[in-house]
Amino acid sequence: MPLYREQGVVLRTHKLGEADRIVTLLTRGRGLQRAVAKGVRRTSSKFGARLEPFMVADIQCYEGRTLDTITQAETLGAYGPPISADYDRYRAGSVIVETAARLAEGDSSRELYTLLVGALRTLAGGRIPPELVRDGYLLRAMAVAGWTPGLDTCVRCGAPGPHTVVAVQYGGVLCETCRAPGSPRLDPGSIRLLVALLAGDWDAALASSERERGQAAGIAAAYTQWHLERGLRSFTAPRS
């Protein structure tokens, strides 16, 4: 059976038998993949910790009929421990990897992989609040997938902004003439925050208020779930 090497982010794992685990990864070159890691649940396993959620690893696999098998794993980014040790980071990370998995189900890209690695690195670093990392990832991941939100001009008539009415079903901001019934009006600073998050401008994002972050978070979540056409379970997971 042919061997190959890949780089991948561990999105989730499932138990298989008494000692094995099925690992779901977003890989750099092959997109979304599921592979078996044998014996990783034994205490003597040397590479089980390298295949936990949020870890980035260089893996060696051999191809199987239904599932490939991971034979080696070397850590490239040890983001799992610092993310899992903090509840807010863990919640944000769970939303990030679930979104990545949903997007990769259709058509993955190397840009999506790179964006995911960068988001987990930033989240693990702890300098940026988890909710900002999460929302920045959501907006940029939607853009990579072809759904860039329109935040500068009215998405219906093209009238130049700034506009503060947002309609996720239309893809961005609306002017007063085009405003759809029920569309929320945000504070101007919340629109500026969405623009900063989409651009990856952390300095501008950090200058935002709690109210602005809350409004931006609501739009980022609604926009993502609208385009994915289903909810994200990680948004509603109960506090343990």
Image (cartoon, rainbow, N blue to C red):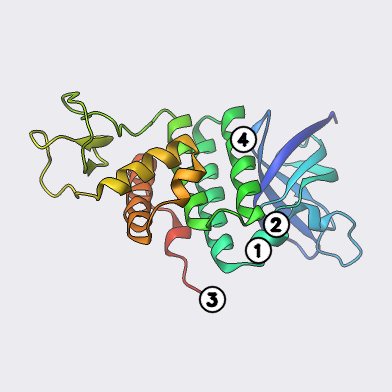
> Identity of the amino acid at label 1?
Ser
- Foreground mark, 3 or 2, reads 2
The residue beneath circle 4 is: 113
- Please state which amino acid type lies under the numbered disc 4: Tyr
Residue 16 in view in this figure: yes
Please state the horizontal and vertical placement of residue 71, each as a whole percent of the image.
Answer: 86, 44
Find disc 1 in the rendering and name its residue.
84
Mark 3, residue position: 240
Which numbered disc covers residue 80?
2
Q: Quadrant of residue 39?
A: bottom right
Query: What secondary structure is found at the residue carrying circle 3?
Result: loop
Figure check: 198 above or below 184: above
- The amino acid type, in three-letter code, at marker 2 is Gly
- The structure residue drawn at horizontal position 43% and vertical position 59%, both measured from the top left corner, is 235
Question: Decide: marks 2, 1 in contact (CB < 8 A)?
Answer: yes
Gap in angstroms between the C-alphas marked 1 and 4: 20 Å
Q: Earlier in the sequence, mark 4 or mark 2?
A: 2
Q: What amino acid does circle 3 point to?
A: Ser
Q: Residue 212, relative to residue 88: is it above or below?
A: above
